[in-house]
Each structure stands twice: as C-alpha cells, then as structure tokens.
Amino acid sequence: MTMPLDVVIMAAGKGTRMKSTLPKVLHRLGGKPLLQHVIDTAAQLNARSAVVITGHESLVVQKAIISIAAQAVNTPAKAIFNAYKSINSVLQEPQLGTGHAVLQTVPVLPDDGMVLVLSGDVPLTQVDTLRKLIEQSGGDKLALLTIDFENPTGYGRVERNGVNSNEKVIAIVEQKDANEAQKGIKEVYSGIMAVPAKLLKGWLARLDNKNAQGEYYLTDIVKFAVADGLTVVAHKINDAAQVAGVNSPVQLAELERVYQQRLANTLMEQGVRLADPARFDLRGELKCGQDVEIDINCIFSGQVSLGAGVKVGAHCVISNAVIADGAVIHPFTHIEGEKLGISVGAGSLIGPFARLRPGAALGKEVHIGNFVEVKNATLADGAKANHLAYLGDSTVGERVNFGAGSITANYDGANKHRTVIEADVHIGSNCVLVAPVTIGAGGTVGGGSTITKSTPPGALSVARGKQVSIVAWQRPKKIAK
Ligand code: UD1
Ligand code: CA
C-alpha cells in the first residue's frame, strides 16, 4: 500500500489513577515519556505526520512534544523520521469521548492518507503489528487491532455476525452499553485502528452521544462502516503487552519490566551476558562489543557503548560514556557523562566505588580506584589514581601515579583553573595541587605537600612543615584536686 500514513495519538485524558501532577503520557518508561514511545513507533512506520490530541494539562504536554521533536530531529538515527518535523497537536476541550477527540484532528488531517489511531498511554505496540494492521486495511477498509481477553471487563467488545471468529465484525460495544450476551464476548478492541482519512471524516461527522456514558464513541464508526456496506477487518494478536495501557503506577512498573525484558533479550541475542535480565535497566541506547558481561542491578542511560570484553560489576550506574575494549568497571561505580561525555580507554580498571563525571577522558590501562572522583580531566595511558582522590580540570600525563588522599584544588571560590601533571610524575599521598599549576615531567611531590607553584621536571618538591621530634618529651599530667 502506497498511501501516505498520518498518525493520530490520543492523549487528552486525565490519568487520575496515576495520582500525579505530571500528565500521564509524560511518565517515563525506560527513561522515555510514554508519549515518546508512541511517537517513536510512528516514526519507524515512516508516517507523513503525527497529531497529538491534548486536553488535560495540554500546555505541559504540548511543550513536551516540542522538545521530543527537537531532540529527535537532532538524533542521526532518527533522521528517517520526517514526521517529527511535522508533529501537530490539537486541543480537545472539554473531553467528550474518543470520537470527539479524533474529531478535533479533522482540520489538520489530509484527505488522501491512511490514519492510524494510537493512544499516548499504550507504549509497547510493535511496529510490525501496526504494519500488518495497516496492510489489512488495504487502503480502503477499516481495520481494528483486537485481542482475546479471558477477562474482557471494561473493554469494548468486538461483536461479530455469529459466534465464529471468522464471521464479519458488525460493531464494537462498550462495556457500559453491552447486554449480557455481548459481555460474554472475549474479543476486545485494543483502542488501535487504521482507517482511510476520507472514510473516517465522513463517519466522525455522524457520531452522536446517545449511549450509556453520554460520550462520542470513536468505536461507533464500526456500525457506520457496516451500514455503508464496507468490510471491517480485525487483526487479532495475542501479546497483551502490545495493547496494554498505563493507568496506574502499578501498570507502569509492570510494563517497565516487560520493556526491560525485551531490551535484555535483544542484548543477550547479540551475545551480551547479563547476570540476571530481571535486574537490568536500560534507559537509553547501549551498544556492546563481543563478550561483554554485565552483573546485576546496573543502570545504563543516554548513549553508552561498551567495547569487546568489557566487564561491568554489580550496581553500576553508567550514562553517556564510551568504554573501550577490555575495560573492567568494578561494582558500585558511577559514570555520568551528561553532555560532555566520558571515555574510558582499553584495559582500564575503574572502581569499585569510583566516580567519573562529565569530561573524564581516560587513556589505555588507566586505573581509577575506590573513592576517586574524576571530572573534566584527561588521564593519559597508564595513569593511576587508586585511592581517595579528586582530579578535576586536570591534564594528567602517561604513567603518572596520583597518591592516596591527594586532590587538585581547581576552584578558587570564583573561577576554575587547570592542573597539569606531566608524564611519569609521582604525587605522594595527601597532597593538594593548587591550580593553576604544572608539575614537571618525571617529578615527585612529597606526601602531605601543598603545591602552589609549578615545579621543574625531575625535581622532588616538598611543601609541608618540617618534622621536629622532641626526645624525652613528657605528656601533661592530670592535676590532683
Ligand atoms: C476505549 C475504547 C474501547 C477499547 C479501549 C481500549 C472507545 C469509546 N472505547 O475505551 O472500545 O476497548 O479504549 O483501551 O473508544 N481520550 C481523549 N479524549 C477523550 C477520551 C479519551 O483523548 O475525550 C483518550 C485517552 O486519553 C486515552 C484514549 O483516548 O489515551 C482512550 O481513552 P479511555 O478513556 O482509556 O478509553 P476507554 O473508555 O477505556
Ligand atoms: Ca472512557
């Protein structure tokens, strides 16, 4: 079918059961707003346009749509999605039902397209499913996505012209309007349909609200289609997660696990070894080389890349970082690249309990040990800071050894300054390097020094009180009262 696709996303509902000030469709699943999941799915269908129907908290939702679109257009992987450049939103105020909702999109919907109706709170529908649904509509039919539920209570029932599942669809009957026989129907409407715009527009104009809820039901268009002599096709699936909506925190958490399991499966199929897929969270994109191992309870977000043979220990939080081949990230390490990003060179050993902050760029075989913080600093190949240290706004040369308890004092209370530590320097324990300062190549700084002036190459620099030992010294004695 070569008809252009226009996607309508319903998102005007209140989401009362979330008990949140945040509009329901902006709650996050896998780190991404529910609405963005739906828009991304539409993107993969190469939709020509998307229109979001907003109502409750419409301004907040509309602002979010603008930022989702802006982000997406800047992401190279999403370049295929022209629809991002043409996401519309329309306001539905007041909210008089799903039919009334879709009616609001009529002015922005082109007549020559196929319309796919989605819900902003149904995040896990697979692209393939929607593709098949659109195919079923064949460009001239109304196609409904349906599913059999053991307990169909609350859903619109798909009524057929007989008991057989291959009989013609004649209506969707809402729970509150259903008679006992209709309530017994297990096949329900998912809330997702594909319908040619021309037909849809004609049917929307015929909707009324003479039903148990006094609402304009989108589902009434099925009756009109049948009355007009058109075939209504049902594309039935059996994966409930694909049509599951989020109405409450419990449902959000359930779908989060479904989503994470999907991501985990994809990674494991690529050969990634997850210690436990049920204790794995990805809230962005994770690229992995061969033989990557990830222990339990790790969280990855933003864009993360792990080279071949990388091992990530338990309880690590990693975002926006590139970790090269063979690096080992020991447990409880926090690597947060934000906008500047972080790179960890091949064969490096990080943690346990290390913290890499934005702009940390580590060469090959760098060692960052426990309670070491690195921020906006370059460490060349073989540099080591193994215990209790802070390296901020620094350039650290090859093979430098940065002692336990030593820090760069990069901030004078007003401005940040840089510390340069040239190759092969040995910084003793408990030193303070007051920036701006350069430690010359091959130099040594004695433990406990506070260095405020640059040091020449090869020198031993000591800047601390001279040791005095008083022999035969007596401690004060308690005075008797
Ligand atoms: C709807 C269907 C029902 C189907 C079910 C699947 C109708 C009349 N019924 O029922 O057959 O089984 O979905 O979940 O369509 N919305 C608006 N404006 C409104 C009302 C709703 O934008 O005035 C949005 C909601 O935000 C939501 C979607 O439409 O995203 C569905 O609304 P909801 O109230 O959940 O539909 P149901 O009545 O459950
Ligand atoms: Ca309703």
Image (cartoon, grey):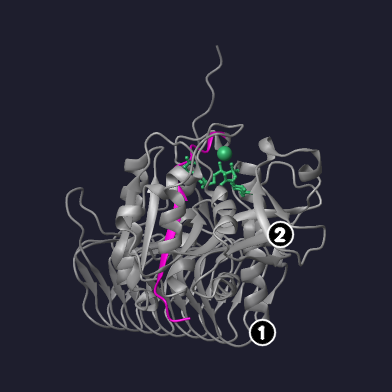
Residue 196 seen in the figure: yes
Q: Is residue 449 above or below residue 444?
A: above
Q: Residues within 10 Å of mark 1 (few under 14, many from 20)?
A: some
Percent position of residue 286, x then y: 52, 74
- Residue at 49% from the left image edge and 31% from the top image edge: 476
- The first of marks 1 and 2 along the sequence is 2
Q: Nearer the viewer, residue 233 or 403?
A: 233
Q: Is mark 1 within 8 Å of ligand 1?
A: no
- Residue 281 falls in image quadrant: bottom right
> Please, is residue 85 above or below residue 171 in the view?
below
Residue 271: assigned label: 1
* Mark 1: amino acid: Gly
- Which residue bears the numbered disc 2? 147
Relative to 25, 89 lies left or right: left
> Which residue is drawn at the image coordinates 48% and 81% (left, top)?
1
Q: Which mark is residue 469?
A: none
**Over which residues does the magenta segment extend?**
1-16
